[in-house]
Image (cartoon, rainbow, N blue to C red):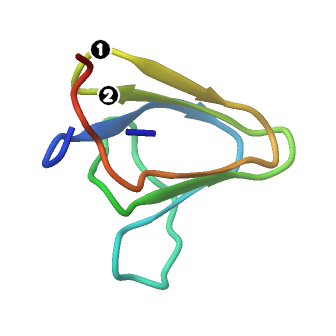
Amino acid sequence: MAARNANFLAASFSGAVQVQREGSEVWFMPKAGLRLGPGSKVRTQSRASCVLLFSDGSKVRLGPKTQFSIEELAPSR
C-alpha cells in the first residue's frame, strides 16, 4: 500500500482485531477511531473483520485471519 506522514484509522471492527505500532513488539486491541501511521500493522483473528479508513478517503476491508502492514502511504496521482 502506498501518504507519507498521512494517517489511517481503524474505522470499525468486529471480533478479535489487534494493532501493532511501528517500533513496538506489543499487539493491542484498538478502539474505533484509533489513528495509526506508516509502519503499523493490523491483524484479525477467526471470525473478525476490520475496516481501515485512509486520509485520502480510501478504505480497506480486512476479513478473518488477515495481517495488513502499512509500509509507506503516498498520495494518489
Q: Is residue 36 left or right of residue 42?
A: left
The reply, left or right, for residue 19 in relation to residue 62 is left
Query: Which of the 4 image quadrants contains residue 10?
Result: top left
Secondary element at tag 2: strand
Amino acid at circle 2: Phe
- The answer to which quarter of the image holds residue 50 is top right
Name the residue that disc number 1 marks: 57
Residue at 37% from the left image edge and 26% from the top image edge: 53
Residue 38 drawn at (x, y percent): 30, 55
Query: Label for residue 21?
Result: none
> SS at mark 1?
loop
Q: Residue at x 74, y 47 (%)?
A: 66
Q: Which residue corresponds to the image point at 69% horizontal and 51% vertical from the top-left?
A: 16
Residue 19: percent from the left, percent from the top? 49, 60
In which quadrant is the C terminus drawn? top left
Residue at image point 78% right, 52% down: 45
Residue occupying the far left of the picture: 5
Q: Vertical placement of 14 versus 59: above or below? A: below
Relative image position of residue 14 (x, y in whole percent):
65, 34
Q: Residue furthest front?
A: 77
Discs 1, 2 touching: Cβ within 8 Å: yes
- The circle on residue 54 is 2
For residue 12, side relative to residue 24 (left or right): right
Q: Is residue 32 left or right of residue 44?
A: left
Front-most of residues 55 and 9: 55
Residue 16 versus residue 2 in the image, above or below: below
Mark 1 is on which residue type? Answer: Gly
